[in-house]
Image (tube, rainbow, N blue to C red):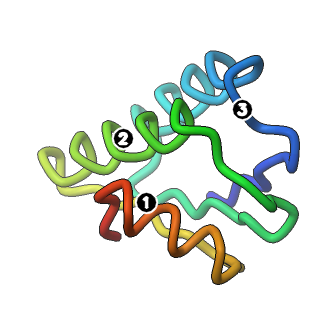
Amino acid sequence: MTIEVNENIGVKTVKKFYLELKELLKKEAEIILDLQNVKRLDLSVVQVLIAANRECMKNNKSIKLKSVSKDIKRQLYLAGFSN
C-alpha cells in the first residue's frame, strides 16, 4: 500500500499520520511512503518513522520510502533512520 505524504506534515499533523500508519501496519505487510511533496521533516515525524520501522522489523513487515529528496535523506540519516 502506498501513502502519499503531505508536504505540510509536522508537529500539528503528526498524530493523524501516526494513527493512519499504525492502522495500516496492522493490515499490510508492506507500506510505501511517497515523500515526493515533502521538503522538510519535523523531528516528531522522524520519531514516528523510526518507531514504525522498529515495529515492522519485529513483525516481519516493512516500510519503504519513495521519491526522497537529498535533503530529506540527509535529515533521516542524521536522525538515525535506516531503511
N-term-proximal mark, 1 vs 3: 3
**Residue behind mark 1:** 63
Q: Residue at x 73, y 55 (%)?
A: 40
> 33 left or right of 61?
right
Q: CA distance from mark 3 to mark 2?
A: 16 Å
Q: Secondary structure at mark 3?
A: loop
Q: Which mark is residue 39?
A: none
- Residue underneath mark 2: 52
Instruction: Say few, some or many: other residues with alpha carbon within 10 Å of mark 3 (under 14 / 14 to 19 / 20 or more).
Output: some
Q: Mark 1 and mark 2 in contact (Cβ < 8 Å)? A: yes
Q: Taking 12 as reference, is 73 above or below it?
A: below
Residue at the spot 46% in from the left edge and 62% down from the top edge: 76
Identify which amino acid the numbered label 3 is placed on.
Gly
Can you tell which quarter of the image residue 69 is in?
bottom right
Distance from disc 2 to disc 1, alpha carbons, whole Å, reads 8 Å
- Is 82 placed left or right of 8 in the picture? left
Residue 52 picture quarter = top left
Q: Residue 29: name its quadrant.
A: bottom left
In the rendered image, which residue does mark 3 sit on? 10
Q: Mark 3 or mark 2: which comes first in sequence?
A: 3
Task: Give the percent coordinates (x, y) of residue 22.
Answer: 47, 28
Label 2 vs 1, first from the N-terminus: 2
Q: How many marks?
A: 3
Labels 1, 3: front one: 3
Q: What is the secondary structure assignment of the residue under circle 1?
A: strand
Q: What residue sits 84% from the left and 46% below the top?
A: 6
- Secondary structure of the residue carrying numbered label 2: helix
Between marks 3 and 2 in the image, the one whose residue lies nearer the viewer: 3
